[in-house]
Image (cartoon, helix red, strand yellow):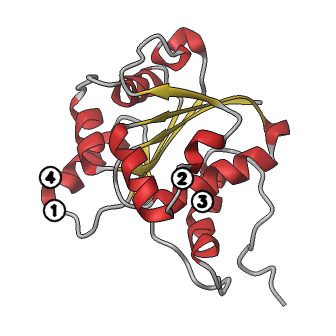
Amino acid sequence: MHKIVVAITGASGSVYSKVLLDKLLTIKEQWTALSVVLTENAKTVWQTELDNDGYKDYPVKMYGSQDFMAPFASGSGQYDTMIIIPCSMGTLGRIATGVSNDLISRAADVVLKERRKLICVVRDTPYNLVHIRNMETVTMAGGIICPATPSFYSKPTTIEAVAATVVDRVLDLAGLSVNTYRWGNHK
């Protein structure tokens, strides 16, 4: 059983966080706690990209980006998985340099220091050398960089299905079991 925190930053790609939350709710038997932290920019981007404020409707505990009393702000909270989706390059940079000035960067620091699973779904493109070095630093510290790069061999036909090709990979990386297209299992 997992204790999972999902962090949503203001990078473009709200569909990824929506699809992830939807899928996590379908596999509730695999986790004991699911918490979400959104930045103010994430709320704006969600409303812009998805034309709604549906992030308010999820039956999970929501935290603001300055709520350092959140249980996952400390290793004693025992959250074992953190997924930052989408992960802005600013957030990645703060994590890579140890700047814990908001709940997302603090929680990521905790996950790394406790040797737990941090998955950063970076969305910007192209990358500059600073981005690449920050990805290297986070990887060397034990994090996983999973670019929001969809696959197409499952022949997705909707934006949500395209996003699910990334989200399903993230769920695999998190150690969760999800029914999805698997290469070599098609007819």
Q: Secondary structure at mark 4?
A: helix
Mark closest to the chain's N terminus, 1 or 2: 2
Q: Read off the residue under disc 2.
A: 17
Give the CA distance from mark 3 to mark 1. 24 Å
Q: Quadrant of residue 159?
A: bottom right
Q: Amino acid at mark 3?
A: Val
Mark closest to the chain's N terminus, 4 or 3: 4
Mark closest to the chain's N terminus, 2 or 4: 2
Q: Amino acid at mark 4?
A: Val
Q: Residue lying furthest front in this view? A: 52
Give the CA distance from mark 2 to mark 4. 25 Å
The mark lying in front, picked from 3 and 2, is: 2
Q: Quadrant of the C terminus?
A: bottom right
Provide residue 164's location: percent of width, then percent of height.
63, 66
Q: Residue lying furthest left in this view? A: 129
Tag shown at residue 130:
4
* Circle 1 residues within 10 Å: few <14, some 14–19, many ≥20: few
Mark closest to the chain's N terminus, 3 or 1: 1
Give the CA distance from mark 1 to mark 2. 24 Å
Q: Read off the residue under disc 3.
A: 167
Q: Secondary structure at mark 3?
A: helix
Q: Amino acid at mark 2?
A: Ser
Q: Read off the residue under disc 1.
A: 128
Provide residue 23's location: percent of width, then percent of height.
72, 53
The mark lying in front, picked from 3 and 1, is: 3
Give the CA distance from mark 4 to mark 3. 25 Å
* Circle 3 residues within 10 Å: few <14, some 14–19, many ≥20: many
